[in-house]
Amino acid sequence: MSPEDANIESLISGLTDFQKKSEVERLLDEALQEPISTEDRLRQVEQVLEAFRSLGLLGRDEPRDLHLLLTVGQTYERFSHLEKAFETFEAALSLADRLDDQETRALVLCRMGRVLSRWSRWDEAEDHLERSRSAYGRLDDSAGLARVALNLGIVRHERGDYAAAAEAYGEATKLAQESEDDKLAADAINNLAVLATIRGDLDEAVRQYEACLATFQKLDDKLGQARTFHNLGMTHADRRDWQSAMDTYERGFKLAQAQGHIDVMANIHLGSADVLLELGGTSMALCYCARALDIYRQVGDRLGEADTYRLLGKGFGRNREWTKADGMFQHSLRINEECENPLGVAETLREIGNAQASRGLGQRVTLRLPIIPRFSYGIIRDFF
């Protein structure tokens, strides 16, 4: 018996024959679908760049260099290495200006704005996106204008200006449909569904998510499907339909894992943890939080970390481990304040108040705010 077989045997001992077969199939399926780590992917990018340098291929053909910089910057962004992504796009912008390549200049400015928004550098993000909009306007490029409108909507959404975000998403949808860009239109509609959920119009949100899923399935866009399943699962959770939420999360997680989209995997871990807390599965919920936190730290998602600390605080509070709960809530507050995220601060303060009420230290807190999700919905960004 090989070590691998022995390991499987130890995991399935005591199970029925049917359970054993199911468990072995699950373990093998997970092993086959295990995505390459972020660190390994970034190392591959660095190796490609070093190979180009060592072979003397950089600097000879500037249009080719520009294409390479765009590809590398996009790859850094894809794996949430925001600082290197921004530096690479800066180099691409300088080269596009030297080549007087206005189309690429507009594209790079949009991508820089998107990176800055993920970095919570809101004013700089809006500045770059407005510059991109002007460049696309001069080119009369409606698809490019749709992309910029989507990203402007995201910035305003994350700053809490929901009316302005809805207007930008509506503009993005209209321009994308005019350009016959179904994927971009679905991305914008998904984000409108997030706003519908915040307004409390859950039926409308479900309708919009299902329309998005139909489009992403038609396009075989697995990332779009995974993100939409995550958001739809959260909406089911808001309706307290826990079984539908977990089923939807599972479908999204399988898609995200198969494609190596670890940011979506982290979001789904967190959503699953929240449902498990509601169902009384505190220990398992804390395990899911730990998995999510590990990924958020890897990819540098500070707001994801803050959401996880808040949920960990809630979980430790359920176990009446008040010192640990207080520590987690303070971590969440600190990060949200550093990132200038007032909604995250409000969500954490609500949970602190509820924990204090459970300890008999005060009354349960009710904040007069728009419907606050227990954690952040996955706004779909135009990644590629």
Image (cartoon, grey):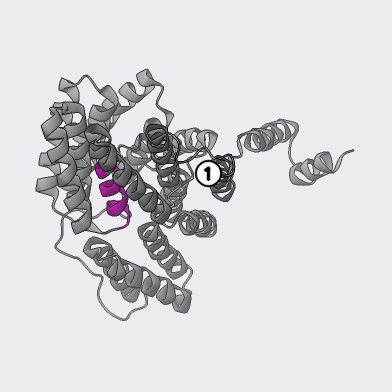
Relative depth, front residue between 55 and 217:
55
User: Within 10 Å of the Cα at label 1, are there few (<14), some (14-19), or many (20+) other Cα atoms?
Assistant: some
Magenta stretch containing residue 252, yes or no?
no
Q: Position of residue 18 (x, y in %)?
A: 71, 30
Q: In this view, does 199 lie above or below 136?
A: below
Instruction: Say which quadrant the N terminus sits in.
Output: top right
Relative depth, front residue between 90 and 30:
90
| Residue for badge 1 | 49
Element on which disc 1 rests: helix
Q: Where is residue 158 in the image (x, y as percent from the top left)?
A: 23, 53
Give the farthest residue toward the right.
1
Q: Is residue 230 left or right of residue 319?
A: left
Q: Is residue 206 visible?
A: no
Q: Where is residue 14 in the image (x, y as percent from the top left)?
A: 77, 44
Give the farthest residue toward the bottom.
361
Residue 151 occupies quadrant: top left
Residue 365 occupies quadrant: bottom left
Q: Where is residue 137 in the image (x, y as percent from the top left)?
A: 11, 33
Q: Is residue 365 visible?
A: yes
Q: Which residue is rendered at x = 40% and y = 46% of the image?
A: 77
Q: Is the magenta stretch mostly helix, strand or loop?
A: helix
Q: Is residue 136 above or below residue 14?
A: above
Q: In this view, does 128 lie to the left or right of 59?
A: left
Relative depth, front residue between 97 and 359:
97
State which region is magenta: 109-119
Residue 74 occupies quadrant: top left
Instruction: Say which quadrant the C terminus sits in.
Output: top left
Give the farthest residue toward the front.
60
Q: Which amino acid does label 1 sit on?
A: Leu
Q: In this view, does 118 lie to the left or right of 268?
A: left
Relative depth, front residue between 5 and 356:
5
Q: In this view, does 153 lie above or below 365?
A: above
